Image (tube, helix red, strand yellow):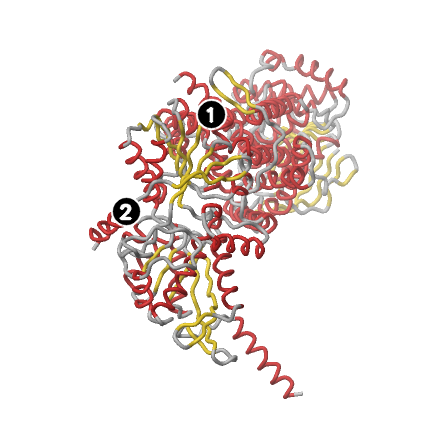
Amino acid sequence: MLSVKNLSIAYNGVKVVHGIDFKAEKGKVTVLIGANGAGKTSIIRSIMNLIKSESDEILYDGEDIKKTKPNNMSRIGISLCPEGRQLFPDMTVLENLEMGAYARKDKAGIATDLVDILDKFPRLKDRKTQCAGTLSGGEQELLAIARALMGKPKLLILDEPSWGVAPIMVEEVMKMTRHINEEMGVTVLLVEQNANVALRYSDYAYVLDVGEIAIQGTGEALLGDRKVQEIYLGI
Amino acid sequence: MKRLILSLILIVTMVLTGCGGGSKASTSTGSDEKGGTETLRIGFNDSLTGAGAVYGLPQQNAIRLYFKQLNEAGGFEVGDKTYKVELVELDNKSDPTEAVSATRKLIDKEGVNIILGWASSGATKAVSAVIGVEYPDVFMLVGTAGEESITADGYANVARIRPPGGYTGDAAGRFVAKEGVKNLAIIGQLKDALYEQYTTHFVEEFEKAGGTIAKTETFALGDRDMYSQISSALAAKPEAIFVPGYVEQAAFVYRQLRENGYDGKIYGFTGGSEAQFLEVATPEQMENVYDLRPVEGTIEALGDNAKAYAEAYEAEYKEPATPNAIYAWDSAIALVEGMQAAGTVDDTKAIIKALKDMPTPESVALKYVDVDGKWFDPNGQTYTSNIALLFKDGKWTYVEDLPADASVYSKYMTSLAEANK
Amino acid sequence: MFGELTQQILNGLVMGSYYILIAVGLSIVFGVLSIPHFAHGSVVMVGGYVTFIFVNKLGVPFILAMLISMILCAAFGILLERSAYRPVRNAPPINAFIVALGLVMIIDNLMTSIFGANQVIIKSPFKSTYTIGSAHVTSLRLFMIGACVVLVAALIIFMKYTKLGKAVRATSQNREASLIVGINTNVVTAIVFGLGSAFGAVAGSLIGALFAVYPTMGTFITQKGFAVLILGGLGSIPGAIVGGLIIGLTENLGSMFISSEYKDVFAFLIMIIILIFKPSGLFGGKGK
């Protein structure tokens, strides 16, 4: 679904990502893990064209998206659940969900999806007229995911979904992610600091270390890898 | 080819020097090619822009017109020489600081020692203090600026045509009491010295005659929203309303008073032409509005000279003169009369002395009240008659002269000058 | 006393409406773009001059002329954003300030050279006066209140119920999130500048008929607008409404109960008092 070749990112002349390659296979959950400052969020923001970067190619479903404007991403089927949620705090849960479908033109489809999503996220349904800024961290994360789903994406990108979320809620968020992938067939690219949780729910994973891909493999394989265990899982 | 370029350079240099207005002149007279007629350079400093331009631009028109007529008639004779006048004009932007620096430029750089103009009180007052102290050989002859201290300060080289505000204020206060008004509200530009002085004297005479002031409200120069002041004033249920202020501001007050349901008499002290008022208020709104002011440019209350002046002004400028422009006109006449009586164009002290020694000459346009038989009193102040005007059928109509006593007021001004020494 | 109170309250509502029409535009521009649009007062003035040309010089009926002015000013405002503010969007805020000052100088001088330094008064078709108890109000002043109510209500409906309106709200709350859900923020920017300038044109036209339009009025208008914004909370529409009303009423009631000499001071006094207790303004605090 998504193929990135030789991506480099620099801030103020300092290179933070050094020519990496990775793929998010269609229908799979792909995970990018790494410590803080490894460059994970920068990678996501470059794909979305929110920041400048250099690469040989960034292909989405076979199309080159290097020049696609950030506000056109939703229209072509890429939905981002950004770092720190980035909700509309003074709008209600319902209004936030409506905004998720902004790029869509099928009014009837949006209406049914809204009902479905609320059913799928009962916590949000209970709070649908509440302002998004008043929800708990975990609820906000769920809302951010639900908002992204309202765009009817083919590729869902999640940037640090565990950040500021209570551990119990983190599991719920990850289960939901897995469910979205398996039941709805959405390709997922997930970027996380919390390696343990991320690896357990992934199909394929890349480990990012100071701007380079250190190891890659299936989630299971990496979970069992000694080096990964020591450095990233703290075992 | 070289000679051509040389002559071109010569011509250009001459033209440029000519356009520069004679920045090298160190005296105020110069020879003309015509032989026999000399050019007399006279300074002019006024509000050509800013809030005072409504009074300053007409003054400029009047003075220019007077000297144009004089020059076209061949100039004027003093002693055995004939002079034509060249005006050196600067804009003080209705601002005191600008006025002082423009004045210094006129005296120090342009070399004039007589300056006419002077419509805005604030700017004029700032300069009169400087000229009175620093330039005793310069003659400052003021047209419209009405603030009392300009002549009450007692500087020998400052004189003024327009009578001080308080002199008319006294007369107006007596008049309004005579009209039978017992309870009066004031809505005025009272932070402005001229209107504050006029009002203080007005209230003194009004209360002496048995009147009471129901309410006093203030607005500032440049204000247009006087609704709250008017609401307050009307709540005191006055029999009449007194409005001292600049013409633009007063016009808005008159309009807003009528809009707020007030149909009674309004006594103003503003000095504006019909056109200036009708730009803001309708003729219906202006009905029953008085203006209590010095006679100024009310031609029907004056004589033939005034008529000739008014016609000439309108013919030249395609619009009627504003009431205050006549002060400038007579100031130019005063200058020529003084020079001829003194027999000199340079000795300003002699010119001033001559002016303070003569009765009002025949050539003037305004109607004056001589003080002890003299046109200019010892403080360099003239006193015109004061009148009541009523706005009727779209025009200001002359009602009557206001009761006034010039020599009493002159003595009062002298006492102020004494206190100032 | 009661009669005067009614009259002064009416006076306050009229000027309050005028301030609201100015402040609302400033508010939505600041809310969405974080730009303090210091040239807004000049746009209001241009709105007045445009209506003046159509009514006094071309004989167009007042309300139609005002609508034309709204459209032209909306375009003008959008043009200003594109050409002047956008290039400095990512630069330090002082640059936007300097740009605004430059715009003010250019626009004010342009108006002076076209119309002269004197005031112009727009001919108003509203000729009647009404009485409410012992208070008087002209139809023009009632129209000012009415126009404000109608326009602000329309704006609120637009923001709350239409797709574009929600896009504007979303962009003001989180610019990046609005990009990723697919909102074209350039369109939102244009809408916000267009609406703000159109409201300004109404304010300029009405004040030009009630009092006058003159080339130096822009600065004074901007000052008042920002006073309202700071009082009501930056970027808040309810804040602009309440702030405008408070300032309009305080000026007139203060004049009534204390003195008309300090009319302009009252508004600033109230502003300071409220800011002491709530530094972010009455409705401020969330987000910006």
Look at 46% across and 51% down and name the residue there.
B303
Residue B7, x across and y down, in percent: 61, 84
Left or right? Give the position of C159 relative to B220. Answer: right
Residue B70, x across and y down, in percent: 49, 66
Query: In this figure, which residue is indicated by the disc labeled 2?
Result: B409
- Which residue type carries mark 2? Tyr
Q: Residues within 10 Å of mark 1 (few under 14, many from 20)?
A: some
- The foreground one among B297 and B150 is B297
Indicate the secondary structure of the residue bearing disc 2.
helix
Query: In this figure, which residue is indicated by the disc labeled 1?
Result: B262
State the quadrant of the N terminus of chain B: bottom right
Q: Is residue C19 above or below residue B42?
A: above
Marks 2 and 1: which is nearer the front?
Answer: 2
Residue C37, x across and y down, in percent: 54, 40
Cα distance in 3D space between marks 2 and 1: 35 Å
- The foreground one among B3 and C72 is B3
Parent chain of label 1? B
Q: Quadrant of residue C4?
A: top left
Left or right? Give the position of B318 relative to C270. Answer: right
State the quadrant of the C terminus of chain B: bottom left
Q: How many marks?
A: 2
Q: Earlier in the sequence, mark 2 or mark 1?
A: 1
- Which residue type carries mark 1? Tyr
Task: Say if residue A47 shows up in the picture.
Answer: no
